[in-house]
Image (cartoon, grey):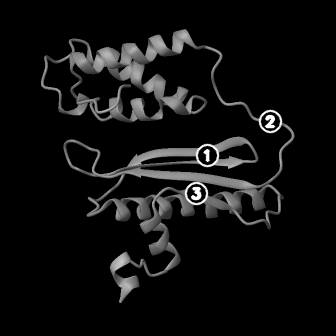
Amino acid sequence: MEQNHKLLADKGPYYNNPVRFRRVVGRLVYLSIIRPELSYAIHVMSQVMHKPREAHWDAVVRVLKYLKGCPGQGIMLKAESDLRIHTFCDSDWASCPLMRRSLFAFVVLLGDSPISWKTKKHDTVSHSSAEAEYRSMAATLRELKWLKRLLGDFGVRHNDSMHMFCDSKSAIYVATNEPCVSREDETH
């Protein structure tokens, strides 16, 4: 799906077979379990299930053509792996064109293999990009705590530290409770 799309705000004609649209998107939801690169496109398509438009069907067809063009893609889980957990999280501030809510995503790796990922729209509107990133970090931390408990239920003791990577310095300062010093404050 192309960047800066306006699919959710599309006002074109309605698609004439909404049942077909729902069936195909529903099947794509299950396929996203092993094809995480489809998560965002399916997230967008699932928001218009009640009244899809022709532009939405065209986007579904593009996803299907993508799948036909690369059938060997998917997640590869390696048998030999260390039990270190790394996670990457990010947020796109006010990315929803209709409600201005932010979108967040994370992926959790056990060794080199992805074991968990999610893309979701925030429940509330964030007032800044730092707040959106902080909320993304909080959701990722909840997932990490759950995964650590799940590993324990499987009999795997995970005593190593888990590493979370975020690209927002201000959100990291908030999370670590450190003061964010500006250049003006340093000179006085």
Say what secondary structure mark 1 lies in. Answer: strand
Residues under numbered marks 1 and 2 in contact, where contact means CB atoms less than 8 Å apart:
no
| Amino acid type, residue under disc 1 in the picture | Ser
Which residue shows up at 13% across the image and 16% down it?
Answer: 13
Location of residue 9 by image quarter: top left
> Where does the image place residue 37, in percent across and percent down from the top left?
52, 31
Identify the mark nearer the N-term, 1 or 2.
2
Crowd class of label 3 (few under 14; some 14 to 19; many from 20; radius 10 Å): few
Give the x, y percent position of residue 118. 51, 45
Secondary structure of the residue carrying tag 2 is: loop
Of all residues, the one furthest to the right in this rendering is 80
Instruction: Determine which of the numbered discs, if any, sits on residue 78 in the image.
Output: 2
Q: Nearer the viewer, mark 1 or mark 2?
A: 2
* Quarter of the figure with residue 150: bottom right
| Mark 1 Cα shell of 10 Å, populated few (<14), some (14-19), many (≥20) | some
Taking the spot 49% from the left edge, 80% from the top edge, the residue there is: 178
Q: Where residue 130 sits: x, y (%)?
A: 37, 64
Check disc 3 and give the amino acid type.
Phe
What residue sits right under mark 3 in the picture?
Answer: 165
Circle 1 residue? 116
Q: Nearer the viewer, mark 3 or mark 2?
A: 3
Looking at the image, is mark 1 or mark 3 earlier in the sequence? 1
**Residue placed at 83% from the left, 58% from the top?**
156
